[in-house]
Amino acid sequence: MAINGQHFRHTGDPDLPLLWYLRDVLRLTGCKYGCDDRSCGACSVLVGGKLKRACALSMTDVADQGITTVEGLADSDGTLHPVQQAWIAEDAILCGYCQSGQIMAAVDLLARKPKPSDADIDGIPNLCRCGSYPRIRRAIHRAALAMQGKAK
Amino acid sequence: MTRAHDAGRRRFLKVFGTATGALVVGLPALAWTPDELLGQNLIVLDPYLRIEPDGTTVIGARDPEVGQGIRTAESRIVAEELDADWNKVVVAPLDLGVTDVGGEPHWTYGHQIASGSTSIPAAWNDLRIVGAGARELLLRAAAEHWKANVDNLRTLRGEVIAADGRKLGYGELAEAASRLKPDPKRPALKTPSQYLLIGQDAGDVDARDIVTGRQRFAIDNWFGDVLVAVIARCPYPGGKLAHVDDAAALKVKGVEKVMTIPPPDPARPLGTQPLAAGVAVLAQDTWSALQGAAKLDIQWQPGPTAAVGDGALAERASTALLGEPTKAVRTDGDFAETDKHAHYHFKAEYRIATVAHADLEPPSALVKVDSQRAVIVAPVQNPRATFDTVRRLTGLAPDRIEVKLPRTGGGFGRFLETDYVAEAVMLAKAAGKPIKLIWTRADAFAHDTYRPFSVHHLQACADSKRNLTGWTHRIASTSRLAGREPRERWWLSEMHPDDLPAGLVDNLQYAWYALDSALPRGSYRASSHAVNAFATECFIDEVAHGLKQDALQFRLALLGEPRKLAYRGHGGPVLDTGRLAWVLQLAADAIGWQKHETSTHGFGLACHFTFGGYVAHGVDISMEGRKLTIHKVVCAADLGRVVNPLGARAALVGATLDAFSTALRQRITVRDGRIVQSGFTDYPLATMAEMPNDVQVILVPSEERPTGGFDMGFPSAAPALANAIYGGTTARVRQLPIWPELLRLL
């Protein structure tokens, strides 16, 4: 499989969840452990361009797929993805633990809906205990504007 | 580590003469700096501060970062008095600062705890001096260089500027400055009109690392050669292992060992030892450990006292409240006599559910222990408590214990405890290998130091002119100090004698009644302020409605002329009624209170004084059938001088939404002696869709000392919401969580 553009071959347990492969083997710890029932979204990653929970996918599920984690969003020259830039601009942080998952969910939403409404944003089910939702919402709107500007 | 490093550092082992006792520089100047930050030409002015020849200014952040923004705020305080160029500031988290003085720990960095919004007031006391003292050294170094009078020099954004316009960067001066002997006088501090950073917005210093996934939270750290541990814990409080068959677990590839953890010692304080007996599976990686733990075949023997749920506790409370109080907390005048002759009488019972912390980052602990040293990387809100636990379990000398303070995904009181650290240290010692202990989400729900359950009996009376003349508040609760402190102190965490309306009503009684519970309890955001403010602020609303008075005017009349009341608890020594009335008025104006009687929406207000901060909430809701819509929320806050308004707003908005989320649906229940909830599915955190799009924050400009602000936005939010629900539905919800009770009433 390809993770953030780099190729990896997994020869161990085919049932190993992608979450623990990313965290334990590759040390891509931006992918967070938060729950066991897909409810929190802290481990959100893109698999084949689709938003997925890394905790709910086995290595077999992702064989030969292209995977993007939060570590792979920025350009190789360090230029941040517009969503990452928007998160910093809106200071959508608080404890920060859920934010990599929130950012992946936002990247996915903006790929599907370049001009998301508040209702579209409400469709993001990722949990935040600290109450950063209003800043996440503003960051998504900001990123949408920035990405439209870029697309023109 | 090279010799040059050692020599370079040793030069700076000197006392920073202007410092308070907490700021004495000693050996910790060696210990605090992460190795990767050390340069060959290291210039140390102070453990909190290092200025490199290129002007890079490394500021050590001493308090644990759990999402309250302390790393940013406290380094802004140092940078302000240093007159640093913020663009050249790098913030580095400090470890717990400890040296060995005659075998006992000596704390070298002063305040190091994330609890009760105390970090900013502490930083205000001593970290300003750090920056100012360093600035003074840099000025003197420049004066020597130019052979100029120091009084003719000034500083601005990382440079010393001479009267004729010549400039020297701090980096160029740092080495010379470090050779100067600090002036033993306390350095002069800036006047507020000189502030360039304090009072201005600053984004979180870790933001870039967080959005790129590079930030290492506690759970993201590793040592080489660790075994990952997952523990199956006894679900019954005080219970023990009856039988375990670990054959299947040991067959899982990667599993190396199965070990047991003994039940907690009832004689030892809660929070300093494991919360439960357990069977630990140690494996080469997390997945193997998880699978191994799932394959354990265990029988547990319940403890002597079964855990019971809130329903059974409520029955006990009813009985307890009929008897004598465990503690008469405050008695002013004579309530009974006043009530007898009063024209209006009010009475209500409020009930507050047991809740769990539900930090998004679960407990974990990475521990390396040998005969020489212990290194701990864990979510830690109280580093000294962590240190104490490690010291007790290892017997190591104080300077042999390193407690790292990684950024942590929430705190809210859970990580004031050290039970999970104790587990990891016990396993590391027994296994002879470093341990990375992981708690699952289900573990975190089943084994928490829950927020106490409480029942509140409130009574009030008013004279014929509808003036409030009497008030009683009697609380029966499962004190969080039980299991930690002697019984006669249990009330201290549960009821504050000077909380309002004490001091506003002539005949007033506060009383507390002990409730026993086998479930462990602990600190939870804003502690009893959150639950007591719910009962008090909702009941005031009831009384206002009962007296046919406007809830805002009633509250303002009760607060009366602005004056300072004595406040003995945390946040005192005084409570200024005028400051509370002002935030209440601001919140009411901004929410559109004047239209509350004519609108189809429900409007609610509440205010509370928490840890020195004055906060009021206004909430505007509507109910259509069973759908609650929160249209608008205002949070008005007077937190004294605000160091970082952007951070304070994040904290106030966050606390408001966290309070709503907790108040609406969250509760821990018990079935057959064990906790029912195991994840966010049966313990729902509010989603983005359920929460208002924004919270309008009004920060009162203030010259008063800063109070910090992480907890303050929590207590008044839920009662304002419940009062708004009453306004919109006439359903008076007297319980937390609100939602199930509201559905019952509708």
Image (tube, coloured by chain):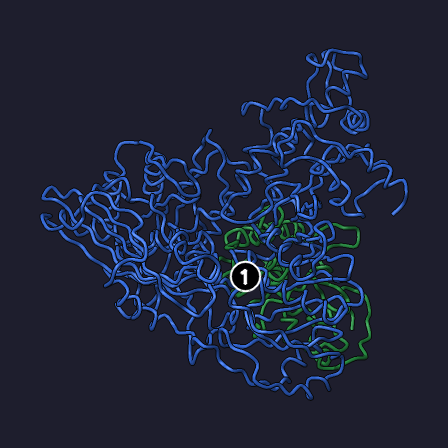
Chain colours: A green, B blue
The residue sitting at 44% across, 43% down in the picture is: B570
Name which residue type carries label 1.
Gly
The percent coordinates of residue B316 (x first, y second) are 31, 69
Vertical order, B679 against B61 (above or below): below
The percent coordinates of residue B389 (x first, y second) are 62, 58
Task: State left or right for residue B161 relative to residue B269.
Answer: right
Residue under label 1: B271
Q: In this rendering, does residue B394 appear at all?
A: yes
The quarter of the picture where the C terminus of chain B appears is: bottom left
**Residue sitting nearer the eye, B198 or B594:** B198
The residue sitting at 26% across, 67% down in the picture is: B319
Residue B4 placement: quadrant: top right
Vertical order, A88 against B248 (above or below): above
Vertical order, A5 against B559 (above or below): below
Q: Chain of mark 1?
A: B
Q: Which element type, helix, strand or loop, lies under badge 1?
A: loop
Task: State left or right for residue B113 relative to residue B48.
Answer: left
The percent coordinates of residue A1 (x first, y second) are 78, 73
Q: How many residues crowd mark 1 within 10 Å: few (<14), some (14–19), many (20+)? A: many
